Amino acid sequence: MADLTFDPKDVAQLSPSLVDGHPSLHDVTEAVSIHTEIETHRNWYIALAISGSVTLLLGSMLAYLISTGIGVWGNNNPVGWGWDITNFVFWIGIGHAGTLISAILFLFRQKWRTSINRFAEAMTLFAVACAGIYPLVHVGRPWRAYWLFPIPNADLNMWQNFRSPLLWDVFAVSTYATVSALFWYVGLIPDLAIIRDRATTKIRHTIYGIASLGWRGSATHWKNYEKAYMILAGLSTPLVLSVHTIVSFDFAVSIIPGWHTTIFPPYFVAGAIFSGFAMVITLMVIARWVFKVEHLVTITHLENMNKVILATGTIVGYAYATEFFIAWYSGNEYEKYTFINRAMGPYAWAYWSMVSCNVISPQFFWFKKLRTNIPFMFVLSIFVNIGMWFERFVIIATSLHRDFLPSSWGYFRPTIVDILTFFGTFGLFITLFVFFTRFLPIIAVSEVKGMMIQAEHEKHYLPATTASTEPVKVH
Amino acid sequence: MIQIEGIGNQTGKKFWRSLNELSSTPKFRQWLGQEFSEGVTDLLDTGSRRRFMQLMAASMGLAGLTACRRPVEKILPFAKGVEGLVHGTPQHYATVMALGGQAHAVVVEAIDGRPIKIEGNKNHRLSNGAANVWAQASVLNLYDPDRSQKVIEKGKETTWEAFQVAFKGMNLADGDGLRVLSGAVVSPTLAGLRAGLMAKYPKAKWVEYEPLNEDESLAGTELAFGDRLRPQYDLSKADVVVSLDCDFLQLDNPGLNVIREFARRRKAVDTMVPAGHAGGGHKAPAHGEEHKAEHKEAAAPPVAASAAAPAEPRAATPAGPGINRLYVVESNFTLTGAQADHRLRLRSSDVSSFAADLARELSALPQGLKILGQSDKFLAAVGKDLLAHKGRAVVMAGPRQPARVHALAALMNQVLGSIGETVSYTRPTAAASGSGIVALAKEMAANQVKTLVVLGSNPVYTAPADLDFAAKYKAVATTIQLSSEVDETALASTWHLPESHYLESWGDAVASDGTVSLQQPLIEPIFQTKSAIEVAALLSTGTIGKGYELVKTQSKLADAAWRQGLHDGIVAGTQASVVKPVANAKAVEAAVNAAPKPAAGLEVTFFPSASSYDGRFVNNAWLQEAPEPMTKIVWDNAALVSPKTAREMKLEDGAVLSLERGGRKVEAPVLIQPGHADNSITLTLGYGRGKVGRVGTGIGYNAYALRSSDAMGIATGVTVTKAARTYTLVTTQEHHDQAGRPVVREASVAAFKEAPAFATHEDDHVELFQLFDAYDYSKGNQWGMVVDLQSCIGCNACLVACQSENNIPVVGRDQVSKGREMHWIRLDRYFTGTEDDAQVVHQPMACQQCENAPCESVCPVAATVHSPEGLNDMAYNRCVGTRYCANNCPYKVRRFNYFNWHKDIEEVSKMVFNPDVTVRMRGVMEKCNYCVQRVQEVKIAHKVAGRTPIQDGDVLTACQQTCPAEAITFGNINDPNSAVAKLKSNNRNYTLLHELNIKPRTTYLAKVRNPNPELA
């Protein structure tokens, strides 16, 4: 929880609906910590078995890929990038919501973020982990992938090419992953200390003790913590924008019609937030039900996220329209053809899947009834994710498969290895989540409590104390 | 790792490469046999390191000793003098490849005793340094692991000695019942041995059979002139060329000289307008200046907007003979048809009627009823054009056409005064014949053949289907076949003998113009093989002959002349003398009148394969992977039909046709070919063979099964039905039009005269703002290339040459279907015009070596970078394989190694690799680099020689060197006197995708056709 000195107008934002049912602070601790402390549930093992198997599938697909060659995928000439980079951008995009919620909403003092930020940040990390696999294994010689990093090595003995957007990607993604992980971890420290303090066994006490870095909850700790958190939030904020901007440069800096366009950075960022929030909805709807934290992750949270989906979905739709307008307005025949080909060519099915999922479906969220309807938003969030996957596929495959010289035109078909590898990344993603939900507090306990205390204080017209009061063990 | 088995005893396929360098030296080999008849081979069979070291030491000693020994045969004079042997230095030897009835004079590059690259022989009039796809690819056959390696008796491996013993035991007596079947006997030595054989066995018969033959052509000249003569064309003098179903540029090509002469006359279009501006390609033409720094509307003025170029003065008179005009009448859309200014698509059966009508139009035949009627306007225009160019016109007839069409062509040439000008006639010393096998089959049926010796052909596969040759062959008591592969005939033979490749045996061959070339080996036979003359000597003398002695004796050349002949690749003064025949119009007329009217309905025509030829190259992976030039099909043959016929028969691409004639049936997949004649189906020979090796087994259908002795070229009366199954043909190009883009730029002669720089009128002549200082390319050698679309015929010679030079892997049919072919140069083929009267243009497309290369800036590891000489270099060992460069290449000419394509290559096949070029591993990108190894080789040589400047023509890229049409020019664009720099300022020069400002070093010369205004 952070040091936020509230303006009186902030008080109005502290809607009680962010925490339902007036639980006590202890209740919150119990609700969040209990799932790390109780005996492992049978269902957890089942979940781990399933997701673990899928992860093993991913591992075997990658082993097959690396031992045999990129040819096991459907990539070809002219479509040099297929599902590999599609999936990379897809996962990176999903990762965006986490940092956005953690950092940007934090800086904008959106209190509703507190219940979902831990979860969203975890999602970010896991999504980036999934995304990070692709750039490494999609290269022809993965055992040389480290040449992409500017580390001194005798093999290459020279600098990388700093003009290449792929190199910028390396920096952008690795920075993003590092800062996101730090941000997440720093936020976890007070909560880890709670679990440590509640530990009943020596092992738990030791492990959580180490992980919580000796957190005692002293005022000095809180002061440093808040500063660190604020700085990381400040660092993360430009990264939210920069990562996907740079990912979009992979395309925008090229000369291929359909890629070579200046609209890509904002369009990609909006799309990333769009898909990231949709993924948070998908996961949160399940998690709040499984872990019985509906009173902490309330319908208000979900509705707010749906509003973001509506807004970013509309931006994405606007970007699609702009692309078409510019294709016509530029008078560039290659550009024009690319977009006609997208809508009417061999990949029209992918294009129209994308439009229906990304542009049409979020429009239902104009209706409050629908954006507060949990089954509806769950289905819709999945649609958005499908649509955003198709967006990346459309951008990559349709632009490459027919560019300048008609003689070189071709078609991309994924192979079973493409499909299973992508499926496998979901296994990894879920597996990481399964571990996360078992061993770490899925909701930022201290932040929620802080918000509750703050609300209580405001309610009783108590003199404004620092909101960062240690959540002493009530009762 | 070290596999040394098979050196001495030749049992295995595995070869240890460096040792092989030694072992392949004939002297060493012989020495080995003499001095260590047993011990060394035993040594070689074990692969321990100690043995290896011992062997190395011994080898070094032996290598030294060989120098002390006087060579028994002086066989390998250097074509390019190299003093002493420097390992790794290429050596060039002239030799000759016989193919069908033709002989291709070639110069072979060998490195350390391994032939690795075939070029044309500059001394030979027919080649002039060019080589066709078959000659280029023949080196791969040498290292084919599926070659026949052992003598086989009734399916069991045995030895030559066993065969010799058995042969001695055969009581041939006076040769009654002895028959020899061979391909065309183009070898004077073989012809001499044949005479010897006939003398020894007076009752024996020698039959020649070539499935692709010139029977009709010779019969036609016999009809017209009363003499079997062979036409020799001189297209350099021909202003008007009429092809009657004759694909003289490719499948029916009588010699590469015809392509060169034709192409030169196409390029002569440049003499019809004033020369272009200096640097016209890169810089804006004068009139373009006013557009400078203004955004030009996307809708560029059309090509023929003559008003746009008022500044260019008109040429008063043409400076040369100018462009020729080509009329083609044909059913199948061939490469010749693609070059046509006017093309009439007609069933091949109707071409004879057209020829008769045209002869009447020329008054070569008395006026009579026009048989055809449907193409009057075309006929009248062609006739008028021919008559207007008397003495400078020529009519050519294709080998599928019956004799009377050839006779009519001869007659028309006489009427046009062309004989002695554009066409002359020689008496062939050897010719490809296809008829003798019919009589042989009759004798076999009558049980008159006791011993049948087949020398180097595969009649069980290629014989006309109606002869039922396979069954008759099996019924012959003793059959002996010499063949380079264990083919259909080998499996049916009592004895199969493995035949040497032409690169490993002595021989000789006479080219179609009579020139004799000597065939000298570059390598000792890799397997236990003998050549046809050695086996023929066995037949006549009872002992296997020595090729060298046989050829030397036969040649009757003195030592100096012999050596000169070996050096030059031709024996001087052997060119056939020209005869001056007079055509008998009456006889031709009688034959024309007696000819039956062609049957209506569907016809089937049989064409050679552009890859497999008559089937002998079906196991050649380079050729199978080379896309058929007109259809772009790989690893297959198809049945080609016109779009209209396809609609009528409700066919789509990949439908399977069932064709039946005379109770014999063939199923063939359909490819709809725009511009194909209606009611005609083109079948390609040379596929559908049995088990022939890892490349050719099971690919395509066998069109021979439908080809009978009465219809070797064109068959009517074929029942065609649609089979239930479908089949997917794989092509390398799926889009056939240019999508309205100015990719191949083309104009008519009239438009060209109006606006010589028409090709660049469509470009925006805006100098784009450069953010950084451009690299100074004004110093040193700056390599560039110009490809002349005017003369490129799309024949694939460059593609195969590139494959051979640059160790380009073959990926196979499945991988091509996934778009993963590796060719560094591809021949883009576009259709223009309507579906029926389509025209075709070809555009060779390789890396354009852009100065502002889009691939370079996106590579994260700087694996592709620019050289100071303007080359876009690839550092293979730095490449990690992100494929970003390929994505960002607007020409899509980069090729990625999706797999390890070299994984399953046999050791013996690795010998074909060019050691000057890296073999790329999987996961890296590759592409054309203007044969940088050749550039470096010349640069180093010049540096060693004292930094003399490199002269124009010192460096030839592989594609340029072999191009029979001289369409590719490479050189230093900084040298204003270089050919390439001059072409860059040609009027027709344009930059493809100019608007991207990537400044490619390869530019194209636009195409100009010469339509007859009367047919406009």
Image (cartoon, rainbow, N blue to C red):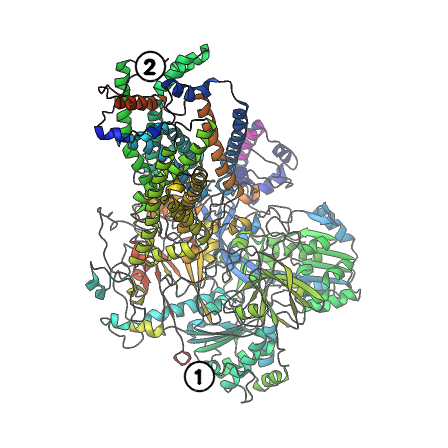
Question: Magenta segment: does it hold B52?
Answer: yes
Question: Magenta segment: does it hold B399?
Answer: no
Up-down: is B821 above or below A120? Answer: below
Q: Which residue is under mark 2?
A: A472
Question: Helix, strand, or loop for circle 1?
Answer: helix
- Disc 2 versus disc 1: distance between alpha carbons? 110 Å
Residue A326 position in % (x across, y down): 30, 54
Q: Residue furthest front?
A: A460
Snapshot quadrant of residue B88 = top left
Snapshot quadrant of residue B478 = bottom right
**Tag 1, which chain?**
B
Up-down: is B558 above or below B320? Answer: above
Snapshot quadrant of residue B648 = bottom right
Q: Residues within 10 Å of mark 1 (few under 14, many from 20)?
A: some
Whether residue B679 sits left or right of residue B894 in the image: it is: right
Q: Does any portion of residue B775 appear in the rendered image?
A: yes
Q: Does any portion of residue A152 appear in the rendered image?
A: no
Point out the stretch of residues depicted in magenta.
Answer: B50-61
Q: Which residue is under mark 1?
A: B384
Q: How many marks?
A: 2
**Tag 2, which chain?**
A
Q: Residues within 10 Å of mark 2 (few under 14, many from 20)?
A: few
